[in-house]
Every structure is written in structure tokens, then in C-alpha cells.
Amino acid sequence: MPVLGLFWDELETEAGVNAPKDNWPLIANLYFPSTGLAYTLTLRQFEGTANPALAVLVH
């Protein structure tokens, strides 16, 4: 099963705003059903040593 992995800050560009530059979930929903394959969406909360999700929660 294919896995689509995205970082949290790629989807939520600022607190409460979901405006990804490239809408990978939409693209996957258009592509994978036509192939008959299911996929898993994984959201990673942070990259590196900083956790941008914490800044979102503070606001």
C-alpha cells in the first residue's frame, strides 16, 4: 500500500489555515482510486529539532 507522508507545516501554513502549496491529498484522491489502490496518509508533526505544531497550539 502506498504511503503519502507530509509534514504538518506543509499543510497548515499558519495557525488554523490549511493552504498547502501542493495539495498532495487532493492529487492522491484523484489518482489512486483510478488505479484501484488504497493509500495511507501520514502527517509528521515536526522535522528537525523544532516542533512547529507547538507554535500552532499556543495561538
Image (cartoon, grey):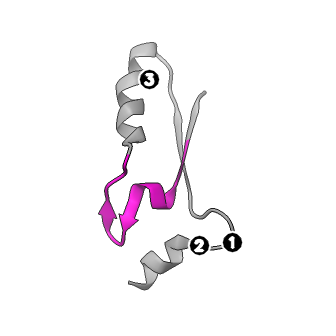
Name the residue carrying label 1. 49
Tell me where the magenta segment starts and ends, as one range. 5-21
Horizontal and vertical percent for residue 8?
49, 59
For the point 60% across and 64% down, which residue is it?
46
The quarter holding residue 5 reads top right
Viewer-proximal residue among 38 and 15: 15
Instruction: Tell me the mark number nearer the camera, choosing from 3 and 1.
Output: 1
Q: Which residue type carries mark 2? A: Asn
Gap in Å between the C-alphas at discs 1 and 2? Answer: 7 Å
Q: SS for tag 2?
A: loop
Image vertical order of residue 14 relative to residue 35, above or below: below
Image vertical order of residue 27 relative to residue 43, above or below: above
Name the residue carrying label 3. 32
Horizontal and vertical percent for residue 23?
36, 42
Is 17 inside the magenta-drawn segment? yes
Image vertical order of residue 55 relative to residue 27, above or below: below
Q: Which mark is residue 58?
A: none
For the point 63% across and 62% down, which residue is it?
47
Image vertical order of residue 26 relative to residue 54, above or below: above
Name the residue carrying label 2. 51
Viewer-proximal residue among 35 and 23: 23
Q: How many marks?
A: 3
Q: SS for tag 3?
A: helix
Q: Which residue type carries mark 1? A: Thr
Choose the circle earlier in sequence order: 2 or 3: 3
Q: Which residue type carries mark 3? A: Phe
Q: Residues within 10 Å of mark 3 (few under 14, many from 20)?
A: few
